[in-house]
Image: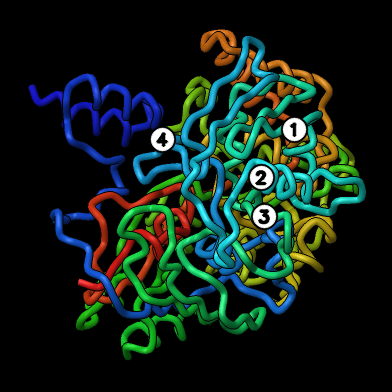
Amino acid sequence: MNPKYHLEQAYKEGTISRREFLQRSALIGATVAVPGAMMAGAAKAEMKRGGVLRLGMGGGSTTDTIDPGTHTDSVGITIERSMRSYLTEVSPSGELIGEVAASWESKPGATDWTFELRNDIEFHDGQKLTANDVIYSINHHIREGSTSAVAGQMGKISEMKADGDHVLHITLSEGNADFPWLISDYHVSIFPENGGWETGVGSGPFSLVNYEPGVRAELKRNDNYFKEGRPYFDGLEVTVIADAAARDNALKTGQVDATNRVSQRTALLLDKAPGVSVHKVVGTKHYTVPMLTNIPPFDNVKVRQALRLAVDREALLKTVLGGHGEIGNDLPIGRRQEFYNTELPQREYDPDQAAFLLKEAGMSGLSVELSAADTAFDGAIDAAVLYAEHAKAAGINVNVIRESNDGYWSNVWQQKPWVMCYWSGRPTQDWMWTIAYEVGGAWNDNNWNNESFQSLLKQARVEVDPAKRKDMYWEMQRLHWEEGGTVVPLFAADLMGVSNKIQLPEVIGSDWELDGQRCSERWSFA
């Protein structure tokens, strides 16, 4: 019996969580990576210094800014990760490690946290990074009138104090056992108190040279970066290429060195192109179809249930993802994540039951509009059209509205009643539920307000007993599965196109695209 093989099979089948997989791996002494994150045939190789990494990326808009509280998509996140640092970060293997923070601890109740900071960090302009800079940066998100996307997430901070330059005390109004994970969020970067975020100054691996929102960005190496040996590249160029086919062509012709969001439909062809490889990384990314549940007809739970039954998930997986992923069960939590509810039945395509529910609701022959643009995810328009075809069997008329890619996240998402969307997912359940499903959250795109769910969310957040926490999260998932306002039909693998001139590390981070959005720091030329 090979324990490593059986462990990997259990993870792939979803019977154990990502965290449990890593813990058991350590116990058996196996050198393993999360399946899907280890690059096939990868071998240890020395990372080389020099050159400029050129990224061709989807997920940029002319409405982007360098205000860390405004980021909504991949280009902004990649630039942010490249020019600024964070208290904590998620390692490629999925564990939480310190970045600016050397260590942290909390008192019982998880309301009082103490972070000891590294003392060797400088900003790009030569200023020393101190605890006061961290306080100033976090206050950007929680100050009165803040419009930051994580205002709610960080709003539980009631007090912050610096103890000298390198010790930070943070007090929460409500305990949160996952707080060190939350501050690894790509919005919560650190910038100098003397200068602010507007200058673009940070302590990350690169400093910003030129920035044209929705077009391109140019960054240069930070020679005083605190992580020894990094970054390996001398510079970073990010070019926004919205069209997937154009990104493929730019990679094949050598205009860029790597791309994100390779189309599921062209991945096999691109992988066969000379000098190019396509890498698949399975993480928590999921495609969603959220509806504003405070707006008719989505305020009717039977309508929501009917729409969930009216989509053929297997067909979407095959047609839209080309099989590169797995079907979802109307939960934003992946099967491999901790506390996933394994007892919920998989929701199947059932147009007859959908029609029956609509009849009970007095809404037979329902007609609704579904807004879509491929910036939501590659193939989003096709997915919406297929959804509309599936729904016809239930007597539902879905009118697909093709929206503009540019400005989609500011003008359509959270503005129109039913839209196509994607989420990169979050490492912990509390983080995912809080950012997208807590009432009043800046990124709550469904407005579902279930009192039992909201109460459990707060209870689970402070509970440190794993068994009790599991029971709470299982019940939250059941409530959302039965009554929630978001259809989650697919979990998608991240596909990235990479020139063979690039040297990749053995393990690729799966928490975000392009190696946790840290490819500029972790990769090098071969």
Considering only order in the chain, which callout, 4 or 2, is on the residue closer to the N terminus? 4
Graded by Cα atoms within 10 Å as few (under 14), some (14 to 19) or many (20 or more), the crowding at tag 4 reads: few
Residue at image location 64% in from the left, 41% down from the top: 131
Considering only order in the chain, which callout, 3 or 2, is on the residue closer to the N terminus? 2
x and y, in percent, of residue 99 in the image = 47, 44
Considering only order in the chain, which callout, 4 or 3, is on the residue closer to the N terminus? 4
State the SS at label 3.
Answer: helix
Q: Report if the CB atoms under discs 2 and 3 are less than 8 Å apart.
A: no
Position of residue 508 in the picture relative to residue 6 (left or right)? right
Task: Name the amino acid type tagged 3.
Answer: Ala
The residue under label 1 is: 160
Task: Name the amino acid type tagged 2.
Answer: Val
State the SS at label 1.
Answer: strand
The residue under label 3 is: 391
Indicate which disc residue 95 carries: 4
x and y, in percent, of residue 53 in the image = 38, 76
Disc 1/disc 3 C-alpha distance (Å)? 52 Å
Considering only order in the chain, which callout, 1 or 2, is on the residue closer to the N terminus? 2
x and y, in percent, of residue 321 in the image = 44, 60
